[in-house]
Image: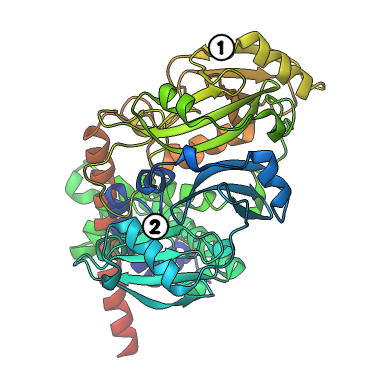
Amino acid sequence: MLTFRRALILTHRYLGIPLSVLFVLWFVTGIAMIYVGGMPTLSAQTRLTHLPSLDIAAVRFTPSEAAERAASGFGRVALTTVLGRPAYRFASPYGSATVFADTGEPLEEIDVDTARGVAAEFVGAQIGDVELVRMVERPDQWTLQLGRDLPLYKFAVRDGAGTEVYVSPYQGDVRLVTTTKARTLAWIATIPHWFYITPLRANQPVWYWTVVAASALGCLLALLGLLLGVTQFHKSTPFRWSNVVRYQGWMRWHYISGAFFGIFALTWVFSGLLSMEPFDWANADGLEIRGDALTGGPVELEQFPPFSAGAWNELLAGRTLKELEFRRIDDAPYYLARYTGENAEADPRRERLHQPYQITGRAEPQHLLVDARTLTAHTELFPTDTLLARLRAAAPDASIVTHELLADYDAYYYSRNGQAALPVLRVKFDDPLETWVYVDPELGQIVASIHRLHRIERWLYNGLHSLDFGFWYDRRPLWDIGMIVLSLGALVTSTIGVWIGWKRLRRGLA
């Protein structure tokens, strides 16, 4: 009959033969992801930067007139540039519609030649250097997150960088740009780390349970290793460090490195498991606050007057307007104008996502909130009392415990390099899950809602997986050094485990 210790040894040994390879893969790609980021994406900043200037003078239809010609309902409404012309884009969770602002006609499906011109203009290439690869109707490796945008034209650009551009035939714009460098880095880091292989990832339930099962078994392997570190500890009299470890050769180094780095390996894999939210453990419904709680209701397009090109030119004062979004804030109509300026510096509060390629010689878009009634810039924060009153009305079953206007990030609302908006109003409620709501007082919108389980998940996932602790997370390269040293230690343990397991397997097969 097997003893408990023998059972631990055998389980750890034979579980470790396949899983040590997976641990090596995870730690190598984890180090790479510190610098690579995620999958290639087209960020909102990049899209806006590459948009041509918005020709207000060519607008002949008001947004309410265009909405009557749209084929579907809408949630978000924006005036942008499509095919070189001003156009209203009506978007909702169920789809989108585009109506040209100069003629009032809806956008029809564009052909290959038109899409080729869109791709060429976006990347600054000659049309002759842009070739159609194929029509992507099912997700490929780079459009796994763009399923709702399919089908897409895929073009290859002869620019020496291996650029590939995906253009929507129904929206008439670019949805994704990748380069050889971005794709290669993704294959080195994100794809193997998260098992983002197209046949697997396209089948979401199979992919999900594959990652969950692999992570759970990895936790078991690391936990068994730590238990063996205790049970195999050899006490000697008199005490000598040389006699503490009963193993020799590579097993000795596997034991020693595992004793030092096993806890990190366990917490790192465990937090990776939690990132998948198995069994929806953190998805309890917190305080329900409607998305239009601070607006007063859906946007009322009839409140936006016809455009005056002269008035807009005076307001922008030489800045290049890229896009207008129509908003309702505190029952009043506002434009959110996104623009670039020749000498404009990037707004550190705005979102910056991983860009698939470098933008040179272009300023990053900034924004300006404009009162549609007076066409003047709204530069003041919306009053705290007004925001609180609307939150109380939206959550009548809960009371506000405390509120505070934060000039800096706290432990739950933050972003590296300052992407998230500041200042922010933090409001704490007394609902059963103790929800905290964060409001951007500049734009009068809720930017985050975090209940108690989310806060626990923040420490169990971000804290353990990224060592996301305030005392060093933003102090690079200190954080980089700590993450790399710990990851390399766990990698050494795993690599030795692979070598020992291979020798054991080879002996068994012989």
Kind of residue indicated by mark 1: Glu
Number of residues whose C-alpha sits closer than 10 Å to that of mark 1, classed few (under 14), some (14–19) or many (20 or more): few
Q: Position of residue 186 (x, y in %)?
A: 33, 61
Q: Going by the image, does 408 lie left or right of 180?
A: right
Q: Residue at x 42, y 59 (%)?
A: 176
Q: Residue at x 37, y 26 (%)?
A: 470
Disc 1: which residue: 404
Q: Secondary structure at mark 1?
A: strand
Disc 2: which residue: 39
Q: Residue at x 82, y 22 (%)?
A: 397
Number of residues whose C-alpha sits closer than 10 Å to that of mark 2, classed few (under 14), some (14–19) or many (20 or more): many
Q: CA distance from mark 2 to mark 1?
A: 36 Å
Q: Position of residue 201 (x, y in %)?
A: 51, 68
Q: Going by the image, does 306 lie left or right of 356?
A: right
Q: Position of residue 189 (x, y in %)?
A: 32, 59
Q: Going by the image, does 6 lie left or right of 72?
A: left
Q: Is residue 45 above or below residue 279?
A: above
Q: Residue at x 71, y 20 (%)?
A: 391
